[in-house]
Image (spheres, rainbow, N blue to C red):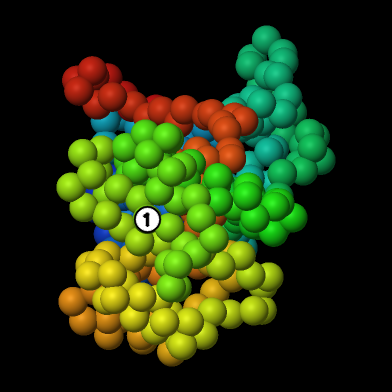
């Protein structure tokens, strides 16, 4: 926020030019300038400059005379005159407007402002990322915890449940036709390195052969096991196979799959399995949904954008 305020102390800026100027000030490389926020759609530097502008404006340090244009206010010049070493949310809390913006306290008094007292209101830690980035990072952390819990549940369950899980997942992904077809095809004790077979589409125009290994973490699937599966596929005249495990594959196993020739083999380890379960809502459900909205620029013409 301090670099943004300093540049705005020089002149009025168009936001896109300000983003470029700040990127220059920070000596960002071309890769850093093009780096996207986790949700995509905009660069990290643009996101952070715009959020810096938003925070500074809510604190009354910047003004927007019109859309896409920003300039310093008298309050902003006064703050710059103090020569602060940094500007963060903790510093901005001295302004009632910013505390109200955070929802930490209500603006009181006839003039709409409280006395400038840095100790008023709770302390807000200075984030190292924008709210959008924090939400995306939190989502990733929640997702990873969920997938770890899913894998633990799978390992605790019975072999019959693991078979049912695979059927449910393949059906959710559009394979297998009906549950009856999938169940009949997948059931069995194994046949020459093949645990089951399922329809690739609802008409059954092609078939996919399956191998499933429910291993504990650390018990990796070796290359010879995958090679045996490939041999079984060739023996059946099959062209497609999927090897699913709750653990991981060794490099030799992945190499064997890549060298399978006319037989196409897809390896799904525990991490990929739980990602697919989350993506297709198998064994999971939505606990909380949050809509993040932004200004519809087409709705506004010369109206200032918040």
Residue 19 visible to the viewer:
no
Q: Position of residue 106 (x, y in %)?
A: 71, 19
| Horizontal side, residue 66 vs residue 110: left or right | left
Residue 124 position (above or below residue 193): above
Q: Position of residue 228 (x, y in %)?
A: 41, 82
Residue drawn at 54 percent across, 79 percent down? 221
- Image quadrant containing the C terminus: top left
* 233 vs 72, nearest the viewer: 233
Residue 13 position (above or below residue 95): below
* 207 vs 68, nearest the viewer: 207
Q: Position of residue 209 (x, y in %)?
A: 35, 61
Which quadrant of the figure has residue 303? top left
- How many numbered markers are drawn? 1
* 194 vs 143, nearest the viewer: 194
Q: Position of residue 83 (x, y in %)?
A: 59, 59
Residue 288 visible to the viewer:
yes
Residue drawn at 36 percent across, 86 percent down? 255
User: Residue under circle 1?
Assistant: 197
Q: Can you name the residue that lies furthest to the top here?
A: 110
């Amino acid at each position: 926020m301090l670099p943004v305020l300093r540049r705005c102390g020089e002149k009025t800026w168009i936001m896109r030019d300000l983003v470029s100027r700040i990127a220059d000030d920070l000596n960002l490389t071309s890769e850093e300038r093009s780096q996207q926020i986790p949700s995509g759609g905009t660069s990290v530097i643009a996101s952070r400059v715009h959020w810096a502008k938003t925070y500074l404006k809510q604190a009354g340090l910047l003004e927007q005379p019109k859309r896409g244009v920003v300039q310093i206010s008298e309050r902003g010049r006064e703050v710059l005159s103090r020569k602060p070493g940094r500007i963060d949310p903790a510093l901005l809390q001295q302004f009632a407007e910013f505390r109200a913006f955070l929802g930490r306290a209500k603006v009181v008094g006839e003039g709409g402002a409280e006395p400038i007292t840095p100790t008023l209101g709770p302390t807000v830690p200075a984030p190292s990322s924008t709210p959008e980035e924090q939400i995306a990072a939190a989502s990733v952390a929640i997702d990873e915890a969920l997938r770890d819990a899913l894998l633990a549940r799978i390992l605790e369950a019975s072999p019959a449940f693991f078979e049912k899980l695979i059927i449910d997942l393949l059906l959710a992904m559009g394979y297998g036709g009906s549950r009856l077809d999938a169940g009949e095809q997948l059931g069995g004790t194994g046949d020459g390195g093949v645990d089951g077979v399922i329809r690739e589409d609802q008409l059954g125009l092609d078939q996919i052969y399956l191998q499933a290994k429910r291993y504990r973490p650390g018990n990796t699937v070796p290359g010879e096991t995958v090679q045996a599966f490939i041999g079984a596929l060739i023996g059946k005249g099959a062209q497609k196979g999927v090897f699913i495990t709750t653990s991981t594959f060794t490099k030799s196993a992945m190499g064997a799959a890549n060298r399978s020739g006319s037989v196409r083999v897809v390896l799904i380890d525990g991490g990929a399995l739980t990602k697919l379960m989350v993506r297709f809502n198998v064994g999971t459900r939505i606990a909380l949904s949050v809509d993040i909205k932004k200004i519809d620029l087409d709705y506004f013409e010369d109206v200032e954008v918040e």
